[in-house]
Image (cartoon, grey):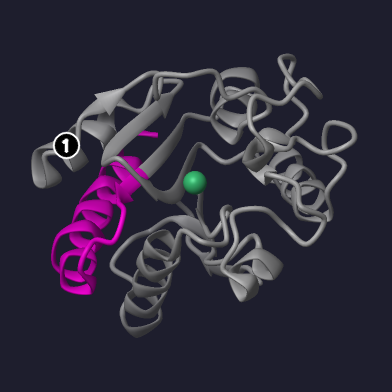
Amino acid sequence: MAYHFNGSGPKTLILGGVHGNEWEGIVCAKALLSSFIEDMPLNLDLTIVPILNVDGAIRNQRKNFNQVDLNRNLPTKDWTKDVAEEKYFPGPAANSEPENQALVKWVEAHKPKLVISLHSWNPMLNVNGDCNPEAEVINKLTGYEIKESIGYPTPGCLGTYTGLEQNMPTITYELERNIEFEKIHDIHVPAIMAALKQTQTHR
Ligand SMILES: [Zn+2]
């Protein structure tokens, strides 16, 4: 399900739960959503999808119902059916999965100026495209390092698709795995809020 806030500022997309077992990103997306429902301090044309991979989240698994890693299935130039590890299974074809088909259709229709996708792993801000205004603020408030690569190839990922190929700067925000709820609420939600203020003025 997607939630939309109808501001006149830059179009912005926030995703959680691309990987269904990365609950930290889902909690963060939902906390942002609750806070915006209570009081929207930003003038953004903002869409939040707290759980892209609902079937995966229900099963507490990385992949979707079809056992595809959605973050290896996007229609990028580097998409490949070769798979390094089973958990990265990219699907039978690029963009074969309904979750990504909906996402791609939306992205192409709305052309967001910034995409933030909330995951969990080793803490970092993986940036694709020019994410400086937002990434620098988040780095200052969280200490999370800004990296252009996570250190291994990720063909068919969202950062490549939107960030590099569609010219929509994309932050893949890797929250620390098993982070405390309080830290999500007290550190990361405010950091993303501060970043979105930059989006409002700089995009
Ligand atoms: Zn992930």
Residue picked out by circle 1: 139
Does residue 87 appear to the left or right of 144 in the view shown? right
Label 1 element class:
helix
Q: In the displayed image of the protein, which residue is found farthest to the bottom?
A: 38
Label 1 packing within 10 angstroms: few (<14), some (14-19), many (20+): some
- At a point 34% along the width and 73% down the height, the residue shown is 31
From the viewer's perspective, is residue 14 above or below residue 2?
above
| Dominant secondary structure, magenta | helix
Give percent across and percent down for residue 120: 38, 50
Q: Nearer the viewer, residue 41 or 79?
A: 79
- At a point 60% along the width and 35% down the height, the residue shown is 158
- At a point 73% along the width and 37% down the height, the residue shown is 89
Give percent across and percent down for residue 146: 25, 27
Asked if residue 194 is among those painted magenta in the image, a careful observer would answer yes
Disc 1 marks which amino acid? Asn
Does residue 138 appear to the left or right of 130 in the view shown? left
Does residue 20 appear to the left or right of 126 in the view shown? right
From the viewer's perspective, is residue 196 above or below residue 65?
above
Q: Quadrant of residue 159?
A: top right
The magenta span reads 174-203
Asked if residue 5 is among those painted magenta in the image, a careful observer would answer no
Q: Is residue 46 visible?
A: yes
Q: Is residue 10 visible?
A: no
Looking at the rendered image, the quarter that the N terminus falls into is: bottom right
Q: Nearer the viewer, residue 154 or 89?
A: 89
Q: Nearer the viewer, residue 154 or 117?
A: 154
